[in-house]
Amino acid sequence: MQTSFTSLPPTAGFGLRHPHVLQVIDRPPAVDWIEVHTENYMSPGGPRLRQLEAIRERFAVSFHGVGLSLGSVDEPDRHHLKRIRALADRFHPAAISDHIAWVRAPRAVGGQSLTDLLPLPCTEEAVATLARNIGIFQDAIGREILIENPSMYLEFAGAEMDHAAFVAETVSRAGCGLLLDVNNIHVSATNLGFEAETYLDAMPFDAVGEIHLAGHTERETPTGTLLLDDHGSRVRPSVWTLYEAAIARTGPVATLVEWDTDIPELDVLLDEVAQAQSRLDALGPDARLSA
């Protein structure tokens, strides 16, 4: 499925991490596109940008950001936005994305940056803040972006809508696309006790420009099993099943395999990519259920 939010091919790719960069440049794998973390390439020069130039010659590239803190009460940092714009103008990525999350404390209390993508309460105020900040982001870079649904580990008091409605309303209000992270849906549903397919059914499928897949880990706690979205293992069978349900609704769509911790040999990662591609191929080019 093609959307106005991305020009990524509707095939499977992977998130490129440092251990694989030179290997990918020297022996390009048979994929159409890869994704990089935007903030890893925001320097004005140096070897990383030269490597990205070599990668961009062979692959379509998606920029996936982790640092804008779109859920923060403050507006996005203007210097950060300028650096993203400069990077996008230079490399013309097929997609740009970030997260429904906050990673920076308010400037009024010091503005400290944190190391995690922290969740937001499902409230009208949070939707309005996200929509404002996404609009600022899109205006600053001159294009529409994708935002990724979060992994959830707890419920906030005072919720005014469920998690799926929160994501869908944010996408609608902001006029942006959706990066549908299927692993995040499974993790959140298990942790909070709702049905993953009910969440999936509430998504705005016409806005989906990219899908993410990843592994997760299980931790036993005094209150039961907690799933952690650590991107450190193969995609679980339950997530593959949910992915199949998702692409039955979207049709073929750009699908990324993420692996960020305990990074394996590239062949292991490419095997996961091949499994995603086989499921896309099985759909046929025109397959899509009515959303």
Image: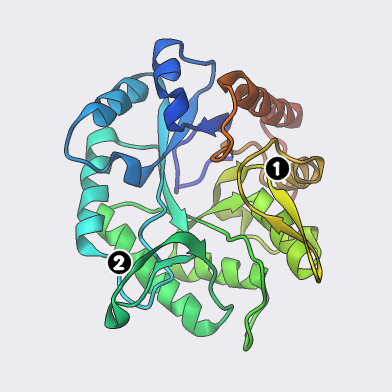
Residue 89 seen in the current view: yes
Q: Residues within 10 Å of mark 1 (few under 14, many from 20)?
A: many
Judged from the image, the secondary structure of the residue bearing numbered disc 2 is: loop
Amino acid type assigned to the residue bearing label 1 in the image: Ile
Residue visible at 75% across and 69% down in the picture:
192
Question: Quadrant of the rendered structure where residue 260 is?
Answer: top right
Extreme residue toward the top, this view: 27
Quarter of the image holding residue 81?
bottom left
Question: Residue 187, image x and y in percent?
Answer: 71, 57
Q: Residue furthest left?
A: 44
Observer-nearest of 49 and 63: 49
Task: Using the image as rendered, state which of residue 82 and residue 206 is in the foreground.
Answer: 82
Position of 210 relative to 282 (above/below): below
Report the residue marked by disc 1: 247
> Marks 1 and 2, Cα distance to the nearest angstrom?
33 Å
Residue 99 locus on image (x, y percent): 48, 58
> Is 247 situated left or right of 209 in this image?
right
In this image, 44 relative to 53: left or right?
left
Quadrant of the image containing the N terminus: top right
Residue 24 image point, x, y percent: 44, 18
Earlier residue among tags 1 and 2: 2
Which residue appears at 68% of the width and 49% of the height? 183
Apparent side of residue 184 relative to residue 136 in the rendered image (left or right): right
| Left or right relative to 64: residue 286 | right
Q: Which residue is mark 2?
A: 76
The amino acid sitting under disc 2 is Pro
Q: Quadrant of residue 270?
A: top right
Q: Classify 151 as above or below 41.
A: below
Question: Which of 64/105 is in front?
Answer: 105
Q: Say which mark, if any, is on residue 191.
A: none
